[in-house]
Amino acid sequence: MSGAQPQPKAQPQPQPQAKPPSPTQPEQQPHRPPQAYPSPQEDKATGQSGTVRKPRTGARTVPRTRKARLRVAKADPWSVMKVSFLLAVALGLCTVVAVAVLWMVMDAMGVFSTLGGTVSEATSADGSSGFDLETFLSLPRVLVFTSLIALINVVLATALATLGSFIYNLSAGFVGGVELTLAEDE
């Protein structure tokens, strides 16, 4: 031996042992909120999967509907004007098409010729033929009149909706606006 000193063997350090749960403190498990619909899960005691967890007494078994209370504090006048303009144009086109279809149906039924003959007889004098209602209520004349009414409606509806948004914004500043409750469907 060349003078080497024997090294003492390293003794293993004792591992800290986990404390057994005391009867007053149960073992900490991650929090799992109660579920509305039970899901199949593995039973820890028997090792069987597919067992259904039963809800606690008084627990809700119907799905929860999320609700939110919102307040319409302001309506942007520019967006109100754009939307009301497009809706008024669509309504005007529907009006023109509906009047054209109605005129064609009434003409096919002979309403204008019968009514025109009656008016012509009632307004005729000695030697004159009277008022010609069929010429006056021709399709082009009716469509021009309907288009003019639809155009006036577009302008008025757009202006009134925009003015209404300004008035709503003023009144919402005083009373807080309209409160809505929105619910989410599952």
Image: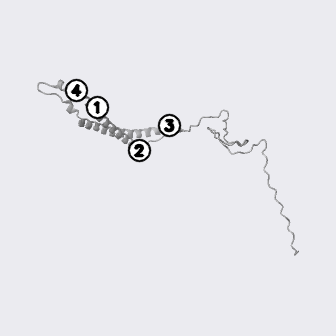
Which of the pair 49/78 is nearer the observer?
A: 49
Q: Which label number is shown at residue 79?
A: 2
Task: Residue at 18% x, 26% y: name it.
Answer: 120
Q: Which residue is mark 1?
A: 105
Q: Is residue 23 left or right of residue 134?
A: right
Q: Which quadrant is the N terminus positioned in?
A: bottom right
Q: CA distance from mark 3 to mark 1?
A: 47 Å
Q: Which residue is mark 3?
A: 179
Task: Residue at 46% x, 38% y: name it.
Answer: 172
Discs 3/4, front: 4
Along the polypeptide, which appears first: circle 4 or circle 1?
1
Percent of width and height locating residue 88:
35, 39
Residue 147 image-quadrant placement? top left
Helix, strand or loop at label 3? It is strand
Helix, strand or loop at label 1? It is helix
Q: Which residue is mark 4?
A: 114
Discs 2/4, front: 4
Three-letter amino acid code at disc 4?
Answer: Thr
